[in-house]
Each structure stands twice: as C-alpha cells, then as structure tokens.
Image: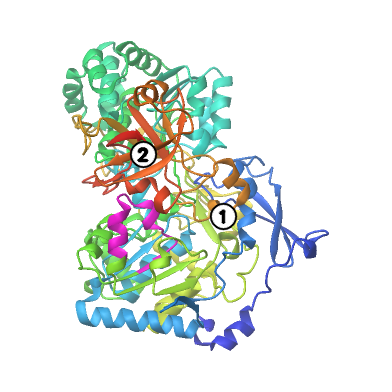
C-alpha cells in the first residue's frame, strides 16, 4: 500500500488536506454532484442520493429506483447528512495531556499507540491488548478489523458491539438452521397472511419496513404483536399479546401447545425435514393456556387466538428483534419462536418464513467477516481445525500463530476491570453508554494503562482515551454493507474526510505497518479489500465469492450465498426444505422456560425495560448531534402506566427516580396507556446521568453472551 511509506506531509500532499467545511452562504447554488449510496442508520440501509457541493453534503434526493425503500426515508435518514458538517467533528488526532486533550500529528499519535501496544504485550503478553470493533462499519472494515487483531496484534481478544445487538439471533439461527441469515427477502412480507412481530418496535427502529407490514395488511394479513408495550405498529394489530418482561419463551411454548393440541402443525414436514421435535412436543405439554397466562400475564384466550391465527394460516412470517433477544435466555427465546415456524413447515417459500431485524447499520455484514471473538472470515468457526487452516493458509501465517477464541465485548470490559487486559483499541464503539451497569464500565476504562480510540466524534468512551485517531464517516469511504435481509449493497464515496481526518481502514493498515505486519495489509483501495474478502469467503458458510463491486451496483445488491460470478444470489433460503446443517435438516430445541436473572421483589417491585425511539440511533453519538432529531425527543422519558403513576403519586412531566441494584436515574415521567402497569420504559440513547444503562443488568446469556437489557427489577418514586 503506497500511502504507508509516505511521510505525513507527503500523505497530505497526495490525499488532502481536505478543505474545511463551507458555510451555508458559501454553498448556495447547484450541487457539484449527486451520489447514490445508502443511509448509515439501521439494517434496512435505505437507498439515498446525497447532494454535494465543495466537498460538503448539502442535502439529499430520493433514490426511487432502489427496490427496498423506493425513495422513502425515515426521520433519521432525511437528516443524516447534517452530521457531516458538525463542529464536533474530529479533524485531527488528539493526545491526552495534563490539561485534557491536545492536537497531535499522525506520526506522533500512531507512534504512541504502537509503542504502548508493544510495551504492554512485552510485559503482560499478547492477550493483554484487546480490540473492540463496530457493526455499523463496512464489510471491508469488519474484515480488516479481524485480520488486524489476529495478525498484527496477535491477540485473541477481539469482539464488536454487535454482541449487544444480534448475538442471540445469530447463535439461534445457526443452531436451528445451520446458517445465520434471515430466511426471506423483505418483499415476501406482503405475501404473508399472518405476521408475528415478536419484540420488535418496527415503526420506530425500522420505519421503512412498516410499509411492508401495511402492504401485508392491505392484502388481508392478520398481524400479531408481542411486546410489553403497545408500540406504534401494535396500535392497529389484530392481536396484541402484552407479555410480562422476560417471559417470551413461555409464551411461545403456550402457543405451540395449542397448535399441537388442535392439530395445526405439519407432521409431514416435521418428519421429512427436521430433527428433535419429540422433545419439544413433550416439553410444551405443560404449557397450557392457563399455566402460560400465569407465567406471561397474557390472557389464555389471547394465547389460543394466536395459536389459531398462526396455526391455520396459508402463509406466514415471523419477525423478531431485540425484545426477545436482550435476555439471559435470548438464544432460548429465539429458538422457541423458531419452533413455531418449523412446526408449520411454512419456511423457504414465498410469503412464508422467518426474519431477524438487524438494528445496526451493518448488523448483518458486521458479524460475518471475522471481527467476532469466535469467528473467522466467511462465517467460519475459529475453533474448527479445517476453518483455521483455511484462513491461516490464505493469510500466509502459521496456523499455530492464529489466536484461539477470546472474550466477548462485555467480558473484555470485565477483564479490564479485573486488571487482566491492560490496553484497548476501539473503533466506532461507545461502551460507556451502550453496555449495562455503566459505573463498572467507567471504572474499567479508568484502569487501562493505554487506550486508543478511532472515531469521528469524541464519544463518551473516547473521552477516556490516551490517543484519539480521527476516523471517517460512512460517506467518506467506499465499500459494501449487508442489509438485514442478506442483500450486499454498495456504498459510494461521497466526500473526503475533513482536514487531517483519515479513512478508518487507512488508519488500521498504518498501525499494522508500524507493528511489522504491513505485508498482510497491502491494499491500495477498498475494492482490494473486498476482493480479498470475497476470495477468502469461498466455500465458507457465508460465501460472497461471486460478488464484485460492479455486479452489486448494477444489480441493486446481491443476496449471499453467491458462490460464483454467474450465480444470481439467494434471496430466499431453504427452498425445498433443505437446511444448512450437514444432514440438510433443521433442528427443534426444547428449552424449558426459566426466569430472568433478576426478578421483582418487595424492595424492587417494578419491571424495568429499555429500547429505542424513532429519532435516535444506538448510543446517540451521531443522532444527538443532529438538532432536528434532538428536537423530536430531546431527553429520555420514563413511560409509566396511569394506574402505576396514580399509585405512586406521579403526574405527567414530574421528575421520577428509577432505581435498581446498580444505580439510579432521574428523568421526566411520561404517563401513557401503552405499557404494562407493572413495567416502566426508558430509552437508552443518552450518556452520563441520563444513561438508562446506569441501571440495567449486565447478566449475560450463557451462549450468546448478550446482556439482559430488556428486564430487571426497579423501584420508581417521585423525585424531589
């Protein structure tokens, strides 16, 4: 890679410096260009055209030809371009000094990072350095992150913030189907005659998919929503099941119990295409409607109605998201709902199937290309000897030098807190806001001997760094992302990074060069990385080997697996009833219901849950800097039912104190009838004293290691 051998001045001469952003007055007139690309928020990845003038994004136009959103955009998509010129944008490296941060040159900042990594590893061992990546970056960056950690750093401790998002769904998909991807393209949704939406607030988290739901309804579909809150889409559902937080698997068992009792399962499909149904049949015998009502709080009659609607449907799809996944039994919850799909045999067909909704910008692709602790590129298993040998040979390293499975994201923070991990490199990850029990996260960050953060804004986590490297926004690089339906789409470069900021993968490659691994990162362009990524994926569980930038762009995206240049891609999985396990059969799983890690009691008698609102995205690092989005929801509110509010003497807009065993938060009350009377809800997009994750529970699912964001015990009182 030519730029790695350039001096700082030569680099600037070749690649910039980029002109400073112009004022709105200077940007009057026609734009210089209109670039087709995709939104940076959520896994829908809507197509959008960005208007550019003098290296500044000044607006957008609908991209009506892109088939997923057909020009439609949500509030975040409409305003996404406004972050590009924000005054908080990092434009040069920063280094910690006695007075806070000071600006630094790239050579000084990178040299400091490398010398500290080398010092820590020489003193404590290679695994004393950890790497945390992000799931909103391109596939190319996800691939480079994993390769950098394992080849340049030589550490086993790499993971990503998708561990807080899609980990339970991914693990369950592999256990049930043998492959981790939604089974159906979104165009199948309007063909379904019954939809179950379990733990997914589609209208606020994936707004454009709402159109697909409404089209299904217009075609006669019945909609079943399962959630502790009457989310916007639930208000017009045919059946709403107000499940008590943490009881999702029991509800799924209760629905399947009635389907079996009334003969609404496909015995022929089960016998021909699945394994282990007898264990599930035996398990759900105990989950009668009355017993299930006692556990879940959902009326027995509603459980029976859900079973009848789902069991007798001609076509059906089940869609779920974090509501059933953010639990210490998130994998079990997902598998219990997958049982409902497999029991009907309605999968692998138009309008019949299953989908997990990805919350992050590249939630699907970000978990496929090797930046997870247990995974190598192409979805390969880091513990599989054949997979390890394949990757090691491709990378040109000794297989014995390829690190073994390491710690997950939350476990990395825990190990920092315990003093085992001494140094950290992170990119586009804000754990101080996004990981539960933020007081512990703060203590961990304070214990690090060295911390380098790569980001485009100074996030709350980056404020604890010793070195901050100014990285790039999505529109300042090129590459690909993979949408929640499994469609790999093309991101076009729109503008250059401002001033001294650099493209993320250039930074990673420069660090690798200084660590002595430069020959493994000799990429001139993002296209070079994609060619390597596709080649190494060939024959793996996640096969992109038939893709190219040109094909992706010309075909409006390609669904994987796509194993050859003449292969059309695979929009719908499991056609003909063949699954990805070696025997071609899907697997039922029989997990009995078990309670959440923390139950309500006399001291903490109310359920607490958290989630998102339509105008904000994840930890809010981006959306809290877009004024028009902030105006829509300027601070977190505590949703509380009128019955509970009356009992506690709380009125609308009163400040309330919500306390758990980990801490407390004070926010205004929002009295609503759309939440269970035994539950309160606060969104999690804010930092510091407004952070919902001050009080959430870091207890982990034993399989996916996802935290239990969605349920813990709290008490609520009016604040003085």
Badge number at residue 239 = none
Q: Is residue 439 magenta?
A: yes
- Where residue 415 appears, x then y in whole percent? 22, 62
Which one is nearer the viewer's eye here, 103 or 291? 103
State the image quarter where residue 3 is shown: bottom right
Picture coordinates of residue 80 (x, y %)? 61, 52
Label 2 sits on a secondary structure element that is: strand
Q: Are marks 2 and 1 in contact (CB under 8 Å)?
A: no
Which quarter of the rendering shows the C terminus? Answer: top left
Tell me where residue 389 appears, x and y as whole percent.
27, 66
Residue 240 visible in this rendered orientation of the protein: yes
Q: Earlier in the sequence, mark 2 or mark 1?
A: 1
Which residue in the structure is indicated by mark 1? 625
Q: Residue at x 38, y 20 (%)?
A: 643
Q: Foreground mark, 2 or 1?
A: 2
75 relative to 333 in the view: left or right: right
Q: CA distance from mark 2 to mark 1?
A: 26 Å
Q: Position of residue 148 (x, y in %)?
A: 37, 71
Tell me the element at label 1: helix
- Res. 37 visible in picture: no
**Up-down relation of residue 385 to residue 641 (above or below):** below
User: Mark 1 packing: few (<14 Cα in 10 Å), some, or many (20+)?
Assistant: some
- Above or below, 51 against 199 in this view is below
Q: Which residue is mark 2?
A: 657
Give the magenta-colored segment's residue range.
425-445
Residue 114 lies in the magenta-colored region = no
């Amino acid at each position: 890679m030519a730029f790695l051998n350039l001096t700082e001045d030569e680099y600037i001469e070749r690649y910039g410096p980029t002109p400073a952003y112009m004022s709105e007055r200077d940007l009057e007139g026609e734009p210089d260009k209109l670039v087709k690309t995709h939104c940076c928020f959520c896994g829908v990845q809507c197509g959008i055209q960005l208007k550019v003038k003098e290296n500044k994004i000044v607006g957008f136009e609908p991209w009506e030809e892109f088939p997923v959103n057909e020009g439609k955009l949500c509030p975040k998509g409409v305003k996404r371009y406004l972050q590009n010129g924000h005054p908080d944008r990092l434009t040069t490296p920063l280094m910690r000094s006695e007075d806070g941060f000071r600006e630094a040159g790239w050579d000084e900042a990178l040299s400091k990072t490398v010398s500290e990594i080398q010092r820590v590893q020489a003193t404590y061992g290679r695994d004393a350095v950890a790497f945390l990546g992000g799931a909103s970056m391109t596939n190319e960056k996800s691939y480079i992150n994993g390769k950098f950690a394992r080849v340049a750093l030589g550490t086993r401790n790499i993971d990503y913030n998708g561990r807080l998002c899609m980990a339970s769904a991914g693990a369950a998909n592999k256990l049930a189907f043998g492959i981790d991807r939604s089974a159906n393209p979104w165009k199948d949704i309007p063909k379904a005659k019954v939809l179950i939406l379990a733990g997914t607030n589609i209208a606020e988290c994936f707004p454009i998919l709402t159109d697909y739901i409404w089209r299904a309804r217009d075609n006669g579909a019945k909609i079943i929503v399962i959630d502790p809150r009457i989310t916007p889409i639930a208000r017009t559902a045919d059946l709403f099941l107000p499940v008590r937080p943490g009881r999702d698997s029991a509800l799924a068992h209760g629905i399947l119990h009635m389907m079996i009792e009334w003969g609404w399962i496909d015995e022929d499909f089960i016998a021909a295409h699945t394994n282990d149904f007898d264990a599930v049949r035996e398990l759900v015998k105990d989950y009668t409607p009355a017993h299930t009502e006692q556990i879940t709080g959902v009326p027995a009659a509603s459980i029976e109605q859900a079973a009848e609607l789902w069991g007798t449907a001609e076509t059906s799809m089940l869609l779920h998201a974090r509501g059933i996944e953010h639990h210490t039994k998130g994998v079990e919850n997902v598998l219990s709902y997958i049982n409902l799909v497999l029991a009907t045999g309605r999968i692998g067909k138009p309008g019949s199937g299953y989908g997990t909704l990805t919350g992050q910008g590249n939630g699907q692709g970000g978990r496929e290309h090797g930046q997870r602790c247990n995974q190598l590129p192409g979805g390969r298993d880091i513990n599989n000897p054949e997979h390890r040998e394949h990757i090691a040979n491709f990378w040109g390293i000794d297989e014995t030098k390829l690190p073994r499975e390491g710690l997950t994201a939350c476990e990395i923070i825990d190990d920092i807190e315990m003093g085992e991990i001494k140094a950290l490199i992170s990119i586009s990850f804000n754990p101080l806001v996004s990981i539960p029990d933020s007081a512990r996260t703060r203590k961990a960050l304070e214990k690090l001997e060295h911390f380098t953060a790569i980001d485009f804004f100074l996030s709350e986590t980056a404020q604890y760094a010793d070195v901050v490297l100014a990285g790039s926004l999505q529109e300042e690089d090129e590459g690909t992302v993979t949408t929640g339906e499994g469609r790999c789409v093309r991101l076009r470069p729109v503008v250059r990074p401002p001033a001294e900021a650099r493209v993320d993968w250039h930074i990673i490659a420069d660090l690798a060069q200084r660590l002595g691994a430069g020959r493994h990162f000799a990429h001139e362009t993002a296209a070079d990385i994609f060619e390597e990524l596709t080649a190494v994926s060939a024959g793996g569980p996640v096969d992109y080997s038939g893709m190219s930038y040109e094909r992706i762009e010309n075909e409006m995206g390609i669904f994987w697996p796509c194993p050859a240049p003449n292969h059309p891609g695979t929009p719908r999985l499991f056609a003909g009833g063949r699954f990805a396990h070696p025997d071609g059969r899907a697997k039922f799983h029989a997990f009995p219901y078990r309670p959440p890690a923390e139950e309500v009691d006399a001291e903490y008698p109310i359920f607490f849950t958290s989630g998102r609102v339509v105008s904000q995205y994840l930890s809010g690092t981006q959306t809290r800097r877009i004024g028009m989005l902030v105006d829509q929801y300027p601070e977190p509110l505590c949703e509380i039912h009128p019955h509970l509010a009356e009992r506690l003497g709380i009125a609308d807009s009163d400040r309330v104190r919500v306390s758990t065993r980990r801490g407390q938060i004070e926010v205004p009350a929002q009295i609503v009838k759309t939440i269970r009377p035994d539950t309160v809800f606060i969104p999690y997009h804010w930092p510091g004293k407004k952070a919902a994750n001050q009080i959430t529970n870091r207890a982990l699912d034993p399989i996916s290691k996802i935290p239990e964001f969605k349920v813990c015990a709290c008490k609520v009182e009016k604040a003085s």
